Image (tube, rainbow, N blue to C red):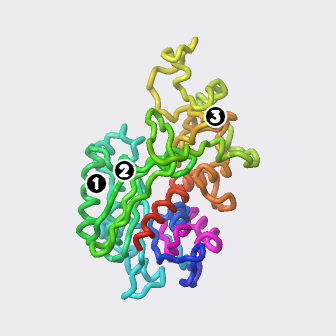
């Protein structure tokens, strides 16, 4: 759908340049890019609810957005059959055949490399066809020829296994073949002021004749699972701090059901199913030690950042609120650093997926600001 036609928009008084977004989702990465001074001119996304969300928020959050292109990028990745082309994307952004965007951003879907899926044989063997969505990004990069790019993905893409290593090696080679230099690093969003521990792979790069941008330095530090960050001078922002003062209404979906939901009230904040194990000294243990995912019956600790929030959690998969319920949508917004007035479109499961698949805007802003400094 065509949204706006004003390409002269400025962000916070200073416009660094133009940007195109791929795999845009609800626009978390795009929000950060806008805050850093880039104007998103076109966004490509296949999910209708996510597209509706971007269009609904466009007037205030994406004032330069000309069009949300509702399309699947898989045909562009494979080159098989008819589908969206890079030329179509550039035209949607209002760019002529001689114009190029300053920035390309995107986070191709991570199902093929998600750490939580390595128990599946077909993922361990590296045969997931969704892996080729990385090639959609590199093809647009090679054909659109932006000055700079940001690519975000799950950090498990860097793992040395059959699914990840060949895909990551191929990705780096295709970026170089397209004529770009790059830096990459796994960054934890909590180390950048986000009240959620969410490690992400970030790649930033430029054309070979331009100045290679840096990745941002951490601003915060604190423990993450069994690790302790040695990053920035500030302590991590906690879930309690993020949700302080937030008034929310009960939601029908917040009741924790499932086979084990009744156990949640007994679990202390910050703990999970391991509370009910013999190793923890429970008088009537229910679970074997490390027999489930860490997120099983996991409860928020108000004194620490939230653990990673998933897009499609199972019935007993947290993190749950310390009040023994699922997180409400306004709370999810806060823990991802979306503005309180950012409106999501769709049913509750769709909203959870849109938020859970998002790049926290505050984190994206700091990555984009580090890149804007090179412009």
Assign a secondary structure to mark 2: loop
Q: Nearer the viewer, residue 353 or 155?
A: 155
Assign a secondary structure to mark 3: loop
Q: Is residue 136 magenta?
A: no
Q: Nearer the viewer, residue 75 or 367?
A: 367
N-term-proximal mark, 1 vs 2: 2
The magenta stretch is 34-63
Instruction: Rate crowding at label 3 as few (under 14), some (14 to 19) or many (20 or more) other CA atoms within 10 Å.
Output: some
Residue under numbered circle 1: 167
Image location of residue 119, percent across then percent down: 37, 37
Dot in front, 3 or 1: 1
Real-space CA distance between mark 1 and mark 2, rounded to the nearest whole angstrom:
10 Å
Image location of residue 117, percent across then percent down: 40, 42
Q: In this rendering, is residue 118 above or below 111? A: above
Dot in front, 1 or 2: 1
Q: Is there CB contact under 8 Å for labels 1 and 2?
A: yes
N-term-proximal mark, 3 vs 2: 2
Real-space CA distance between mark 3 and mark 1, rounded to the nearest whole angstrom:
38 Å
Assign a secondary structure to mark 1: helix
Q: Quadrant of the N terminus?
A: bottom right
Q: Is there CB contact under 8 Å for labels 3 and 1?
A: no
Q: Is residue 39 magenta?
A: yes
Residue under numbered circle 3: 257
Disc number at residue 112?
2
Left or right, 216 with respect to 123, comes to right
Image location of residue 313, percent across then percent down: 54, 42
Left or right, 284 with respect to 82, comes to right
Residue positioned 43% across, 77% down in the render:
89
């Amino acid at each position: 759908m065509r949204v706006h036609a004003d390409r002269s928009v400025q962000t916070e008084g200073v416009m660094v340049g133009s940007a195109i977004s791929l795999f845009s989702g609800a626009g978390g990465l795009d929000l950060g890019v806008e805050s850093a001074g880039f104007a998103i001119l076109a966004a490509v996304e296949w999910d209708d609810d996510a597209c509706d969300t971007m269009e609904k928020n466009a007037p205030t959050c994406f004032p330069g957005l000309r069009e949300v292109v509702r399309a699947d990028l898989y045909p562009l990745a494979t080159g098989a059959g008819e589908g969206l082309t890079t030329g179509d994307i550039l035209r949607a952004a209002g760019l002529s055949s001689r114009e190029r965007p300053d920035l390309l951003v995107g986070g191709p879907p991570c199902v093929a490399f998600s750490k939580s899926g390595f128990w599946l044989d077909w993922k361990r063997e590296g045969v997931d066809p969704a892996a080729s969505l990385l090639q959609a990004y590199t093809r647009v990069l090679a054909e659109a020829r932006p000055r700079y790019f940001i690519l975000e993905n799950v950090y498990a893409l860097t793992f040395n296994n059959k699914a990840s290593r060949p895909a990551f090696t191929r990705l780096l080679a295709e970026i170089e073949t397209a004529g770009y230099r790059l830096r990459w690093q796994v960054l934890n969003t909590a180390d950048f002021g986000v009240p959620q521990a969410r490690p992400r792979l970030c790649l930033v790069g430029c054309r070979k004749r331009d100045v290679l941008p840096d990745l941002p330095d951490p601003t915060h530090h604190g423990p993450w699972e069994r690790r302790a960050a040695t990053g920035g001078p500030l302590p991590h922002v906690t879930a309690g701090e993020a949700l302080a003062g937030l008034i929310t209404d009960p939601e029908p979906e917040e009741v924790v059901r499932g086979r084990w939901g009744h156990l949640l009230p007994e679990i202390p904040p910050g703990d999970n199913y391991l509370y009910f194990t013999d190793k923890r000294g429970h008088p009537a243990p229910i679970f074997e030690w490390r027999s489930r995912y860490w997120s099983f019956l996991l409860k928020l600790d108000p004194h620490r950042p939230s653990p990673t929030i998933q897009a499609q959690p199972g019935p007993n998969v947290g993190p749950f609120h310390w009040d023994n319920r699922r997180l409400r949508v306004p709370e999810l917004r806060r823990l991802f650093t979306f503005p309180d007035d950012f409106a999501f479109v769709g049913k509750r499961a769709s909203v959870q997926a849109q938020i859970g698949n998002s790049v926290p805007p505050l984190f994206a802003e700091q990555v984009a600001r580090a890149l804007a400094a090179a412009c």
